[in-house]
């Protein structure tokens, strides 16, 4: 489901929530949480605003939160503070008795929207015709349930930024080639680290239905979907060069959703979890420029006053779609629950859920 479709399904939050004081909203959220007890579970992604994350029962990355929600059998209502594809994954993994809710249906993901199922189903026969039955699809968990289902039907698996290397290695034991979507940068950086040459990777452009590649296609081992993260794509080589010039003793750590050029010039790269743990373990007085989402960077700055931490890009904005989830929307959702009405429930059709689950389970079996 793209952003426009989500907005059509969106229940408008009453204006009064936008005029309430922060103190009143926080008090009401705490009261509702207390009244519901174990029947309510609020997972919060690392990129959420502090005004929301303070009420999270668990924090983590998208798959981690979905798995935690799935293990929480007592929770009838899972109010997922993240984006649409994360709530979909939670719905796929949780029980039939559990309802997954997204406080604002406009909280999508630009990367996930860069690969819709119609585009993928149009591309797949062309790839099969070009390469034969030599391709295994892999999809980043930052993708729609429909894309996960496509991958599951075709023998592939999901990956996270934490386990991408293991999953790509596994994929190469199954087929000669990999079709990696929707983030070309994670796919490229992972394959390169495993020894695949840049000249052995082709980009598939879903808008022109064609390869972006010069040379003999039969030499290609990895086909990368032309998609990217709009946040991590804003970290540049110029940002790194500025840090090297002005603060040569500062460590640079970035997310693998950044471009190959940025990852190559950084000191460290890894998943959100890796970045958090690296900063936590770093010695007092160490200096860090972090290339990831701004809410998380600001939170790390607050949590580690003994270290000098800056954003690699000082003009970086938080993830705009992730920031759709705010305190007023959280309260509005919870107050409707208190009245016995569910707004913005995320429901994945069973057929799609079954195939998507197959992709998720293949990943979980190999990590």
Image (cartoon, rainbow, N blue to C red):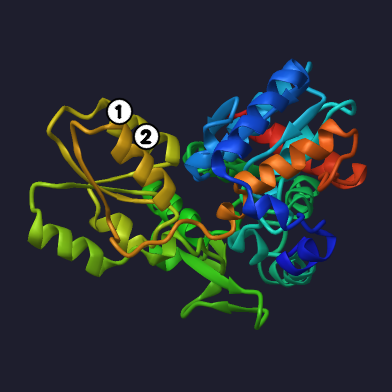
- Give the vertical position of 123 relative to 351 (above or below): below
Q: Is residue 253 left or right of residue 190?
A: left
x, y percent for residue 258: 40, 58
Disc 1 vs disc 2: Cβ atoms closer than 8 Å?
yes
Which image quadrant for residue 172?
top right
Q: Quadrant of the N terminus?
A: bottom right
- Give the vertical position of 309 relative to 99 (above or below): below
> How many labels were placed on the picture?
2
x, y percent for residue 167: 55, 39
x, y percent for residue 238: 23, 69
Does any portion of residue 117 appear in the rendered image? no
Which image quadrant for residue 71?
top right
- Of 341 and 199, nearer the camera is 341
Which numbered marker is on residue 280? 1
- Give the vertical position of 90 relative to 178 (above or below): above
Quickly name the residue at label 2: 276
Q: Is residue 137 left or right of residue 356?
A: left
Give the residue displayed 61% in from the left and 50% down from the top: 142
Q: Is residue 214 left or right of residue 342?
A: left
Does any portion of residue 134 appear in the rendered image? yes
Give the residue displayed 86% in from the left and 47% down from the top: 352
x, y percent for residue 285: 12, 33
- Of 63 and 16, nearer the camera is 16
Q: Is residue 36 left or right of residue 299?
A: right
- Of 159 and 366, nearer the camera is 159
User: Callout 1: few (<14), some (14-19), or many (20+) C-alpha neighbours within 10 Å?
Assistant: some
- Give the vertical position of 217 relative to 282 (above or below): below
Which numbered marker is on residue 112? none
């Amino acid at each position: 489901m793209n952003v426009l479709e989500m907005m059509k399904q969106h229940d408008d939050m009453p204006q009064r929530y936008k005029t309430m004081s922060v103190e009143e909203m926080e008090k009401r959220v705490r009261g509702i949480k207390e009244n519901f007890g174990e029947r309510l579970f609020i997972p919060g992604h690392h990129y959420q605003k502090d005004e929301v994350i303070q009420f999270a029962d668990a924090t983590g990355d998208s798959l981690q939160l979905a798995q935690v929600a799935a293990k929480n059998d007592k929770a009838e209502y899972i109010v997922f503070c993240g984006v649409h594809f994360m709530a979909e994954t939670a719905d796929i993994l949780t029980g039939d008795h559990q309802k997954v809710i997204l406080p604002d249906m406009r909280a999508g993901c630009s990367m996930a929207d860069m690969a819709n199922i119609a585009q993928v189903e149009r591309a797949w026969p062309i790839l099969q015709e070009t390469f034969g039955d030599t391709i295994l699809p892999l999809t980043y968990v930052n993708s729609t349930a429909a894309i996960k289902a496509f991958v599951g039907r075709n023998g592939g698996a999901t990956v996270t930024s934490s386990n991408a290397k293991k999953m790509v290695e596994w994929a190469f034991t199954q087929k000669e080639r990999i079709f990696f979507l929707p983030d070309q940068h994670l796919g490229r950086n992972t394959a390169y680290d495993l020894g695949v040459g840049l000249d052995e990777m082709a980009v598939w452009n879903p808008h022109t239905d064609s390869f972006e590649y010069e040379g003999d296609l039969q030499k290609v081992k990895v086909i990368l979907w032309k998609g990217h993260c709009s946040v991590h794509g804003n970290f540049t080589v110029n940002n790194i060069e500025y840090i090297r010039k002005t603060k040569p003793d500062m460590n640079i750590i970035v997310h693998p959703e950044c471009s190959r050029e940025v990852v190559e010039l950084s000191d460290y790269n890894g998943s959100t979890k890796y970045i958090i743990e690296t900063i936590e373990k770093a010695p007092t007085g160490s200096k860090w420029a972090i290339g990831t989402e701004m809410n998380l960077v600001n939170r790390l700055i607050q949590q580690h006053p003994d270290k000098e931490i800056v954003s690699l890009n000082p003009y970086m904005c938080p993830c705009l779609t992730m920031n759709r989830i705010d305190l007023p929307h959280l309260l509005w959702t919870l107050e409707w629950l208190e009245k016995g009405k569910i707004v913005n429930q995320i429901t994945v059709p069973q057929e799609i859920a079954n195939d998507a689950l197959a992709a998720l389970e293949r990943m979980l079996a190999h990590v």
